[in-house]
Image: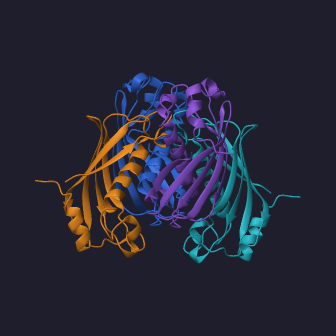
Chain colours: A cyan, B purple, C blue, D orange
Amino acid sequence: MAFTYRQEVMFRHCDPARIVFYPRYFEMLNDVVESLFATIPGHTFADMHADRAVPTARIETEFLAPSRLGDVLEFTLSFPRVGRSSLHTRFVARCGEEIRLRASSVIVHVGTGLRPAPWPDDARAALVAHLEET
Amino acid sequence: MAFTYRQEVMFRHCDPARIVFYPRYFEMLNDVVESLFATIPGHTFADMHADRAVPTARIETEFLAPSRLGDVLEFTLSFPRVGRSSLHTRFVARCGEEIRLRASSVIVHVGTGLRPAPWPDDARAALVAHLEET
Amino acid sequence: MAFTYRQEVMFRHCDPARIVFYPRYFEMLNDVVESLFATIPGHTFADMHADRAVPTARIETEFLAPSRLGDVLEFTLSFPRVGRSSLHTRFVARCGEEIRLRASSVIVHVGTGLRPAPWPDDARAALVAHLEET
Amino acid sequence: MAFTYRQEVMFRHCDPARIVFYPRYFEMLNDVVESLFATIPGHTFADMHADRAVPTARIETEFLAPSRLGDVLEFTLSFPRVGRSSLHTRFVARCGEEIRLRASSVIVHVGTGLRPAPWPDDARAALVAHLEET
């Protein structure tokens, strides 16, 4: 089941063209991921950042229509694949019926020295709940 | 010929994992593009933003190795293709010999109402100078 | 009556010292102000930013204790004074009982050319509801 | 002698009112401080952030005139006082002859657990070079 997240477009997101400045979308996408991990006891970003992290290894993004101040964006996040220490993500952001952004990324679970580390079993079980159906 | 741009990794770029927070790389990539346009008289971002803009339509990025506070990043920007109103970009960021990031994007030149508008001839001529050789 | 606003400390707010990077607090304070104006019909930031704006003319801030990833900050915003075209603000941010930040600023309502413009009557009436009692 | 720092106003600094969004000025001020410490061997932000930090305890800022895309800002930073573990700063940002911003802050040198720690002698000697004359 996709995870959902709502973000209103704030003044701080917008640029002189009066639309969302695209690097700010990536801050939003990070908030989406962080909010999903906030639902996994023991694996919130606060829990993890003593000795673990979940850096993004790659991300592809299409900006399909501009977003403006006050627009309410509804994000969905689902996972095409949960790897041993990786997570393949798919994001869609909509305003009403209009798709504003599509993105897919690979996130890696790393431990000391930023080396890939297998997902702990409980984290994996929680992530798998957001796997896309095939 | 590729356009080059140098950016030291500053404190504001870094996250609690003590590496560059990936949305900040997109701010850097925007600075690279903005700095290239700063070399084209009449088409700097300041010139354009009365009634034109150059939003990013899509971008694909690989983060190949983490960057840390104080690292000096050397960006190159070249264009695989200059379209009628679009610009296909290729970015590489290196620290010394190590490639940290590769990205490619499509930027669109838009006018009033954010509608695509052909590159003016002088802008096109300047952009073409950074076309990749084939 | 003070306006209240809740913001969890997110990864994007934090720096390599693993505390909120102080410029990010100002983004939060702007969100607080923007959220208050969102309660005033016809004077949301989206309404205003065609030909008006509310830039900050001055701000004084004390950072009394550091905030960390996952902390939930409760902001209050009240107004010591509502001027003809200005607004004197007072912010307090707490995490539980602990005060993390105190700030006071002067915001100016400006129209075309960024020139000060009197608050419209309905906006003033809404702002006055958050005046501090004397 | 005041430390000087030059920053062009970039697209990422600007808001829908097409002027610098004030939280971005604080990112610039942090860059100014970071650039000054970059001149002190052994005390760059990269050197310090293993077990030390220099958080800002308070800051007062006046925004005297708006800055626009492409403006070149010249910052000066000097120190009214170098305390045992504190640093009192004074910033001025000008565009040409026009003063855009004045700020003063107190920065604290902290060690493990974010507890104030005396400036090391060599750092102090370097900081004292930027003391204001009395």
What x and y, as percent, mark residue D47? 39, 70
**Outermost residue, front direction?**
B134
Does A76 sit above or below residue A53? above
User: Left or right: where does residue B123 sit relative to residue A79?
Assistant: left
**How far across and how far down the image is residue D37, in percent?**
32, 62
Residue that appears at 74% across and 61% down: A88
Q: Residue at x 53, y 37 (%)?
A: A15
Pick the residue in front: C15 or C84: C15
Frontmost residue, A24 versus A32: A24
Outermost left residue: D134
Of all residues, the one furthest to the right in this rendering is: A134
Quadrant of the frame with the C terminus of chain A: bottom right
Residue sitting at x 41%, y 69%: D49
Q: Could you tell me which quadrant the N terminus of chain A lies in? A: bottom right
| Left or right: D61 in relation to B38 | left
* Residue A63 position in % (x across, y down): 68, 41
* Residue B19, x across and y down, in percent: 52, 64
Residue displayed at 60% across by 69% down = A53
The quarter holding residue C56 reads top left
In this rendering, the answer to whether A68 lies above or below C114 is below
Residue placed most toward the observer, D126 or C101: D126
Q: Is residue B1 above or below residue C74?
A: above
